[in-house]
Amino acid sequence: MSAVEGVLLIPGFEQTSQNVLILGAAVIAILLFAFQKSGTEKVARAFGPLMVLWFMCLTISGIASISNVPSVLKAVNPYYAIKFLIDNGITGFFILSEVILCATGGEALYADMGHLGRRPIIRAWYFVFAALLLNYLGQGAFKIQHPDATNILFAMVFHQAQFLYIPFLVLSIMATVIASQAMISGMFSIVYQGIMTHVMPMFKVDYTSTELRSQIYIGTVNWFLLVAVLFIMYEFKESHQLAAAYGLAVTGTMTLTGIMMTWIFSLRGKPFLAVMSLLVTCVDIVFLLSNTYKIPHGGYWSIILALIPLSIIVIYTSGQKKLYRALNPMGINEFLEKYNQAYKTTNKISGSALYFTRDAITIPPYVFNTMFNNNIIYEDNVFVSIIRRDDPFGVIGFFKDNLADGLRVFEIQIGYMEVIDVEEILREAGIDEKTIFYGLEEIVTGNFAWNIFSVIKRLTPAFVQFHKLPPHKLHGVISRVEM
C-alpha cells in the first residue's frame, strides 16, 4: 500500500483519492495471491536481479542525500539515542514503538531462513543491511532539509531525480511484490513444517514444480492471508496508520523468536549463545512494551488475527491427543498374539497390504478391526511409520525386523524440513502393494472445542491423501469415536 501511495507525487495524480489507491493495492494483492497456485519457478529467476537493483537504488539515493547533510552520520553513535531517551523520559520510551518500524522485515528473515536455509540469507543480509543503513541515514538527512515532507523515501527520490521517479515507483511496487512473495513462500514452508511436526492440521498441499519438490502451495493458507491483507487495507486505509498493528505484530514475533532461541540454546548446552540470545530478547521485550500503547489504536487487530491460527493449533493438538486416547489402541504383544492365530487360520489374500501407523508398538483400531473383525489378511502385511528427526534434512527408508510371519515393518525417517514423496520411497524399497488401508474417525461429541476439531478433521485430507498415494489402492476404515 505504501508503494502505491507513491503515485500521489506524480504530477496530475496529486488528488487521487485514497479509495482508488486502496483499490489499486487490492488488485495487486489479489493478482499476487491468485498467481501462487501456478508457482513462481519460472519468474523467480528475475527476483534476485530486481532486488539487487532495488537495493542499489536505495543505496545511491541514500548516499546522495547524506552528501547534503553529512552530520547525519552522527546518528550511528548510540550516545545520541541514549541521550534522547534520558532527556525525554516516558515519551522517548514510547517513541521506540516508531523507531522499531525501521527494522520491520527482520522478523521475516526467520521465515525465509526456514524456506531457503541459513547461508543464503546471511550472505544477502550483508549487502541489504548496508543498503538499508545508508538509505535510512539519507532519509534522515532529507527530513532535516525538508521537515514538512511526508512519505519520505518517495519524496527524497522525487526531489533528487524527477525524471527517474516513475521508473523508481514501478521498481518499488515490484520490490514490494517480491518481498510479499518471499513472505508467502516462507509462510507455506512454516505451515508445512507445522503439519509434518503434527502441530497443524493436514492442509491440502500442492507441488508447483516438477523439479523442486520444496516449491509448494497451500490453498487454505494462501486465501486466509489474502482475506487478512484485504481486510487490513480496508480497516486502516493508509499505510502510516498500519504502524499501530504492524509494530505490535513485528515486536511480538521478534520477542517470541528470541524466547524460543534462548530456550533452544539452553537445551542444547550452549550457554554463551543462550546468554547472547537472552540479551537480544530483552531488547525485543523493551520494544514490545513500547508498542503496548498502540493496542487500543488498532494494535488489537494484530492480536485478533494471531488468535485465529493459535486457536487452530491449540484445538488441533489437544484434539489429536484426546482422539488418540479415545481410540484405545492395542498393545503390540496382544496384537501379535491375535495376529499369529488369525494368520494361521484365515484365508489370506495374495499380494501386499500397507497399514500406516505412528509406530510398531501401539496398533490403531482400524488395523485390528480390518484383520480380526473383517477377516482381511494379506499374505504380506507391511506397517509403515514416518518418523520425524530433529535434524532438518535427510531421508532414509528401511525395513526393521519382521514382527511375525507375513508382518513386516518399514520405517521412513525424514528431516523436519524435507518435502517427501512417500510413493517413490516405497517403490525404491521394492514394495509393490495391492492395497493401502488407512483409518478415518467419525467423532461424536457434545463439547464445543471438539466439534471444531471434528470439523477441522473433516475439511482436511487424510494422511494418505495428503501424501498423494494412488487413490485406486486406498481403502478407508471408519472408527466411531466418542470424545
Image: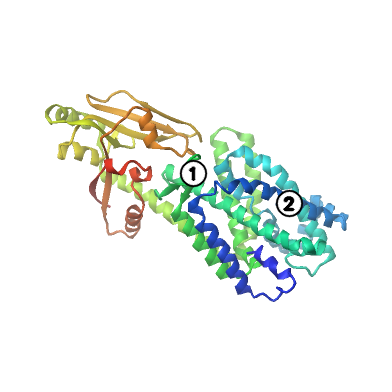
Mark 2, Cα crowd under 10 Å, few <14 / some 14-19 / many 20+, is: some
Above-or-below relation of 248 to 373: below
Nearer to us of marks 2 and 1 is: 1
What residue is drawn where x is 33% and y is 60%? 448
Residue 293 seen anywhere in this rendered image of the structure: no
Circle 2: residue type: Leu
Question: Which of the numbered marks, if any, corresponds to residue 178?
Answer: none
Looking at the image, residue 218 sits to the left or right of residue 249; the answer is: left
Residue 425 seen anywhere in this rendered image of the structure: yes
State how far apart marks 2 and 1 are (Cα): 33 Å
Circle 1: residue type: Ser
Above-or-below relation of 172 to 429: below
Residue 368, position in %: x, y?
A: 21, 37
Q: Which residue is mark 1?
A: 209
Residue 437, position in %: x, y?
A: 26, 40
Report helix, strand or loop for mark 1. Answer: loop
Looking at the image, residue 44 sits to the left or right of residue 140; the answer is: left
Between 231 and 103, the one lying in front of the other is 231
Q: How is the image coloured?
A: rainbow
The outermost residue toward the front is: 42
Residue 112, position in %: x, y?
A: 58, 46
Between 326 and 463, the one lying in front of the other is 463
What residue is drawn where x is 62% and y is 56%? 288
Which comes before the other along the chain, label 2 or label 1? 2
Q: Which residue is mark 2?
A: 132
Mark 1, Cα crowd under 10 Å, few <14 / some 14-19 / many 20+, is: some
Where is the N terminus found, in terms of image quarters? Answer: bottom right
Report helix, strand or loop for mark 2. Answer: helix
